[in-house]
Image (spheres, rainbow, N blue to C red):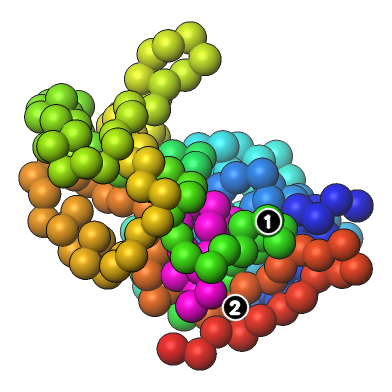
Amino acid sequence: MNLKQMVGYKAAEFIKEGMTVGLGTGSTAYYMVEALGKRVKEEGLTITGVTTSRRTTEQARELGIPLKDVDEVDYIDVTIDGADEISDDFQGIKGGGAAHLFEKVVAQLSKEVIWIVDESKMVKELGAFPLPVEVVQFGSGQVYRLFEEKGLNPVFRQTDEGEKVLTDSGNYVIDLHLSVIDKPHELAQWLDSLTGVVEHGLFLDTVTKVIIGKEDGPVVKDVKR
């Protein structure tokens, strides 16, 4: 069992009967959804899933996990999702799979948020992983130029065919190559203020538990806020 599979299956153990569960997106979350599907089938576990992307929706449906739209629930008991970087003080960057807008909507409705990662995602400070910024298509070049002027090293995310990546909402993604983010809260506040920016990948003061995949087994860390 690889590290991603290990933490994905470990995270599924935290789901209890009757819960509404946010189902994350990405290679690690894939295994968590897989494990939940097995519990639904083999244990008769009754849960309701709220997904964060079309990919996860398709996977959950194939596994027989009952789903509701995010607007059909009052709250979510727990969301389990991957992360691209987690700093020493448990702030995060997400959006490597271009699903961070939906992931943030679901996370903010959640009583508890669990991030599942292999140990390579744990870093001292954020920034080595490019920060995804989702922008509307109209005027996206203007936002790009602003990022250039600010020295944020922007790059439009592209497919293998050289087309601009489209999110599930039909927006573009500009990745900011920053190396180090000294003041993530200030950067988040500034990005939130920009017209044309829909959402960014800084997930701050969000997570309540982190499950880290290590060679000798998963480590569960509770995050105090």
Position in image of residue 21 (x %, y %) = 57, 66
Q: Is residue 145 visible?
A: yes
Q: Residue furthest bottom?
A: 224
**Left or right placement of residue 92 versus residue 78 in this view:** left
Q: Quadrant of residue 81?
A: bottom right
Q: Quadrant of residue 216?
A: bottom right
Position in image of residue 45 (x %, y %) = 76, 68
**Left or right placement of residue 32 versus residue 148 in this view:** right
Which residue is located at x 33 percent, y 65 percent? 182
Say whether marks 2 and 1 touch (CB < 8 Å): no
User: What's the mark number on residue 54?
Assistant: none
* Label 2 Cα crowd, 10 Å radius (few <14 / some 14-19 / many 20+): some
Residue 130 counted in the magenta span: no
- Which residue is tagged 1? 120
- Which residue is tagged 2? 209
Which residue is located at x 15 percent, y 25 percent? 141
Q: Main secondary structure of the magenta part?
A: loop
Position in image of residue 85 (x %, y %) = 53, 57
SS label for mark 2: strand
Which residue is located at x 26 percent, y 42 percent? 152
Please, is residue 157 above or below residue 7 in the view? Answer: above
Which residue is located at x 48 percent, y 50 percent? 128
Position in image of residue 55 (x %, y %) = 56, 37
Kindly identify the amino acid type of the residue bearing the numbered disc 2.
Lys
**Left or right placement of residue 44 versus residue 164 in this view:** right
Which residues fall within the magenta stretch?
80-95
